[in-house]
Image (cartoon, grey):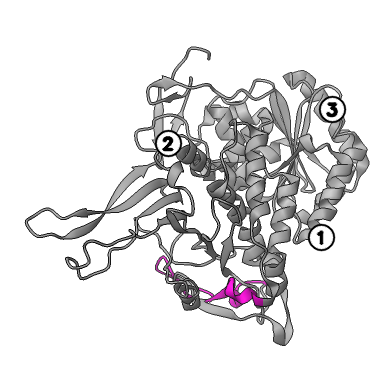
């Protein structure tokens, strides 16, 4: 593959798929990632995460020749499958994901194996280790292993202890890496308890705490946009930026995750991980070198600089909401307390808006507004950098309306793009202003291979690149900073905080508009 280039590009649902060869970017070849030969061992292989995310991602990487020859998958779960049944079940999932190729699947499925295990049974895991060692010899996997925990979080500590007891964590003939999905605990205390189990059985360099949001290309592009362009970084500070907004809006409800969501709510589900990690990319200082550990250190510094939430006056920095019945995408939908397996008197928040400050030289006094919710009008994730107004308005006697500030919008999903909003004169003899948008679509003009979030993080696991993974100290800091908000949200009885209701299909509670309007600002919503 050394000198080959892309020769055949298909587009399926707007996404390019490269059949063979090397990825080309703007006419120039770029270096491919070359992961080591390895076994991927999935705990919870019959579950939704494996079916919806992991297996389609692994298949996509295999089909596009991004996986080494010495590669195979062992699925472990309690479901009564054999290899054939497991492969048939995974085939259905990969077909649902789209872009299915029967020939590629035939080659991929030969590398799929399954063992029924009880995670409490050390002997069963020891048998799995023997199986992995044998298959590693057949496929040339060289003793390298990715151990992926795709189980409910309640099983993590048991599995980790028994992995170590069975010898699966050993690195005798190669490396072993364990991948731990969120939620990493439900508060600081439980996160530290889990970390204690992890650290007793694995070295820190073996641990990959995954937040798939960081695998999105547009999140990583924040660094490139800031630090590879000399026109933006000089104004990326308190002197030019009035405030920053980060919105994660979801049109779906809780699906079939009532058990999880009743325990988590929006703060644990979105804010502690996705929101704070993306915030760290927006606000970080440039590292001296683009190297994984240096980047992670700069992101950690942002979390450490977050101004502690004031427990005595928290409601000025936090508001919570819960959706009631409404209409989304032309369909009537139930309210949260009408969802299956949700308590009728549940006060679990499905929406939150927060205001945060970063107390350092760059960001002192600049508010960061964070908002996320379920069953909102549309699905989008975007960052809005709103600049300060012009210091002197020389056009005050010319225009009746106020001239608004410029804004930079970085859209992470669904349509990945960067928009710069500014003002220009209308054509014609009259002196009139209009708002115009300079619009860059992230995939515009690009015919190379694009990886989704799980494809990217799986590749990084196999190559050992930890740049997009959460470090232990950063994980603990995020729980520590959010603790006052969680305590308020979890309060029961007469002292619990208000949950402002909002109709499904709206942009959230009207109180969220007042929350930011009290500072003389307004939310920026999604515009196609």
Circle 1 sits on which residue? 189
Above/below status of 466 relative to 248 = above
First-in-chain label (1 vs 3) = 3
Residue 403 covered by magenta stretch: no
Which of discs 2 and 3 lies nearer the camera? The answer is: 2
Question: How many angstroms separate mark 2 from mark 3 (CA)?
Answer: 42 Å
Of the numbered discs in the image, which one, if any, rests on residue 240?
A: none
The secondary element bearing badge 1 is classed as helix
Q: Residue at x 90, y 35 (%)?
A: 126
Question: How many angstroms separate mark 1 from mark 2 (CA)?
Answer: 41 Å
Circle 3 sits on which residue? 171
Q: Residue at x 54, y 50 (%)?
A: 362
- Point out the stretch of residues depicted in magenta: 313-341
Image position, residue 524 (x, y; %): 41, 62
First-in-chain label (2 vs 3) = 3
Circle 2 sits on which residue? 229
Q: Residue at x 41, y 52 (%)?
A: 409
Q: How many other residues sit within 10 Å of disc 1, few (<14), some (14-19) or many (≥20)?
A: few
The secondary element bearing badge 2 is classed as loop
Q: How many other residues sit within 10 Å of disc 3, few (<14), some (14-19) or many (≥20)?
A: some
Above/below status of 95 relative to 290 = below
Which of discs 1 and 2 lies nearer the camera? The answer is: 2
Q: How many other residues sit within 10 Å of disc 2, few (<14), some (14-19) or many (≥20)?
A: few
């Amino acid at each position: 593959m050394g000198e080959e280039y892309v020769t055949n590009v298909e587009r399926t649902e707007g996404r390019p798929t490269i059949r063979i060869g090397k990825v080309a970017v703007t006419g120039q070849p770029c270096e491919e990632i070359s992961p080591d030969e390895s076994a991927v061992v999935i705990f919870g292989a019959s579950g939704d995460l494996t079916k919806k995310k992991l297996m389609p991602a692994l298949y996509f990487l295999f089909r596009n020749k991004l996986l080494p020859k010495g590669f195979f998958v062992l699925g472990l779960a309690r479901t009564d499958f054999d290899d054939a049944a497991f492969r048939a079940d995974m085939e259905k999932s990969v077909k649902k994901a789209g872009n299915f190729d029967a020939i590629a699947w035939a080659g991929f499925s030969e590398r799929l194996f399954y063992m029924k295990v009880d995670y409490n049974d050390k002997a069963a895991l020891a048998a799995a280790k023997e199986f992995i060692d044998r298959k590693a010899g057949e496929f040339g996997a060289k003793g390298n292993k990715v151990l992926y925990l795709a189980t409910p979080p309640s099983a993590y500590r048991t599995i980790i202890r028994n992995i170590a007891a069975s010898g699966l964590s050993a690195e005798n003939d190669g490396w072993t890496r364990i991948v731990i999905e969120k939620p990493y605990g439900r508060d600081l205390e439980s996160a530290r308890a889990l970390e204690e189990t992890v650290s007793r059985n694995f070295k820190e360099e073996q641990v990959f705490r995954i937040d798939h949001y960081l695998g999105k290309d547009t999140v990583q592009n924040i660094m490139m946009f800031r630090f590879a362009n000399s026109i933006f970084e000089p104004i990326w500070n308190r002197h030019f930026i009035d405030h920053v907004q980060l919105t994660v809006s979801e049109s779906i409800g809780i699906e079939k995750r009532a058990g999880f969501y009743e325990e988590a709510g929006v703060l644990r589900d979105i804010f502690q991980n996705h929101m704070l990690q993306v915030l760290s990319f927006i606000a970080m200082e440039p590292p001296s070198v683009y190297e994984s550990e240096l980047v992670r250190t700069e992101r950690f510094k942002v979390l450490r600089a977050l101004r502690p939430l004031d427990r005595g006056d928290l409601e000025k920095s936090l508001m919570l909401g819960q959706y009631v019945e409404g209409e989304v995408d032309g369909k009537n939908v139930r309210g949260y307390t009408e969802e299956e397996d949700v308590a009728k008197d549940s006060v679990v928040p499905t929406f939150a808006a927060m205001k945060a400050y970063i107390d350092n030289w760059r960001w002192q006094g600049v508010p960061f507004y964070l908002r996320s919710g379920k069953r909102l009008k549309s699905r989008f994730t975007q960052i809005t950098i709103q600049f300060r107004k012009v210091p002197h308005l020389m056009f005050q006697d010319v225009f009746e309306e106020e001239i608004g500030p410029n804004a930079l919008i970085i859209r992470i999903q669904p349509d990945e793009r960067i928009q710069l909003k500014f003002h220009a004169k209308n054509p014609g003899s009259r002196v009139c202003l209009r708002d115009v948008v300079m619009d860059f679509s992230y995939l515009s003009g690009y015919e190379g291979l694009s990886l989704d979030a799980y494809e990217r993080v799986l590749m990084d696991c196999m190559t050992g690149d930890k740049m997009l993974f959460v470090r232990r100290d950063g994980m603990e800091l995020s729980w520590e900073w959010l603790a006052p908000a969680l305590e308020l949200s979890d309060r029961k009885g007469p002292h619990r905080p208000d949950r402002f209701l909002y109709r499904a299909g709206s942009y959230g509670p009207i109180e969220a508009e007042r929350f930011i309007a009290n500072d003389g600002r307004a939310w920026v919503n999604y515009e196609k």
